[in-house]
Amino acid sequence: MSSVKSRNVSREDKNEIKGGTLYLVATPIGNLSDISERAIKTLREVDFIAAEDTRNTGRLLSFFGISKPMISYFEHNKRERGEIILERLIKGESCALVTDAGTPAISDPGEDLVRLCAENNIPVTSVPGCSAVVNALALSALPTGRFAFEGFLSTNKAERKKHLESVKSDTHTLIFYEAPHKLKTTLADMLCVFGDRKISLCRELTKINEEIMRTTLSGACEYYSTNEPRGEYVLVIEGAGEEGKNENFFSDMTVAEHIDYYVSSGMKKMDAIKAVAKDRGVAKNEIYKQSLK
């Protein structure tokens, strides 16, 4: 029977920056005080930094008095730049990968660079810190033991609906990112597909205007019918199975009441008719006829 020997690793050894290693460095999502001592040390000591936006990262580095060579690495140049970064790592340089805010490789092209390094036996280590996903989940007042992070929904309506349908029966708490200009449409689509579930809308996390709104999807739709969304959002939604899956919330409603329910939540009447038809499993034309009575 073989045994594995372990050794004590000092804090200094663990924090030593080593050549030929990729460091995933989490950066603040709003409050600069959230950066860790280890993150600052890593950014100071690596050979170069791969950044989503070198201008944004440049301001962060300047604030902490750090001057370091940078290379841009983002969604539209990740293949070309990934190979360049890999080549430098193979030659023995150390690199810190940062995104504009939060943890690299989470809903971020950094995942491709991590995969590329793994395929080429390049060591990768994480310098942990801020994550909007975890912050929002902790603040949501929804179940945190099991959750599914779904990232951003597609801007294509059909793809967006398809994505929502695919997680409709998921019993995990669901987490999405959303931009302000798409929020109203997203909430209406979620209400249509999920039914009226609980939701926590987490806005501008760690910033001066941080706001946590705990409501329902219908309540959120109603609120934003008269209030313009501002800032970046993390949406935390209860999963199916919580409080009866919400699949038959309309069981005591007439067809007219069911339509009015969706219209009052911000939907156009024809979209509401489509939603009612889908909920009840009948033809859209049949619901339309009943709405005229």
Image: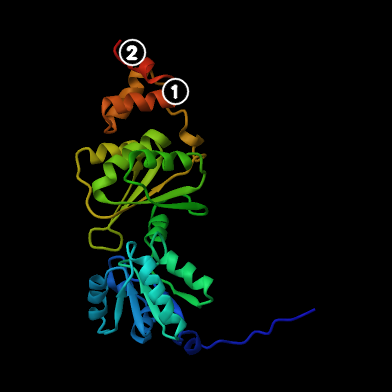
Q: Is residue 26 shown to the viewer in this render?
A: no
Along the line of sight, which residue is nearer the eye, 141 or 260?
260
Binning the other alpha carbons within 10 Å of mark 1 as few (below 14), some (14 to 19) or many (20 upward) gives: some
Location of residue 7 in the rendering, given as x and y in whole percent from the top left corner: 62, 87
- The residue located at (27%, 29%) in the rendering is 264
Which residue is at the front of the view, 18 or 9? 18
Q: Locate residue 183: give its quadrant.
A: top left
From the image, which quarter does the N terminus lie in?
bottom right
Give the amino acid at mark 1: Arg
Quadrant where the image shows the C terminus: top left
- Image quadrant where residue 279 sits: top left
Where 233 falls versus 116 (above or below)?
above
Residue drawn at 37 percent across, 20 percent down: 284
Q: Which residue is mark 1?
A: 280
Judge the density around disc 2: few (<14), some (14-19), many (≥20) Cα neighbours within 10 Å: few
Three-letter residue code for mark 2: Lys
User: Depth check: 50 or 282 in front?
Assistant: 50
Provide residue 215's location: percent of width, then percent of height.
34, 42
Q: Earlier in the sequence, mark 2 or mark 1?
A: 1
Give residue 146's position: percent from left, percent from top: 52, 52
Alpha carbon of mark 2 to alpha carbon of mark 1: how far?
14 Å
Which residue is more in the foreground, 62 or 243? Answer: 62
The residue tagged 2 is 289
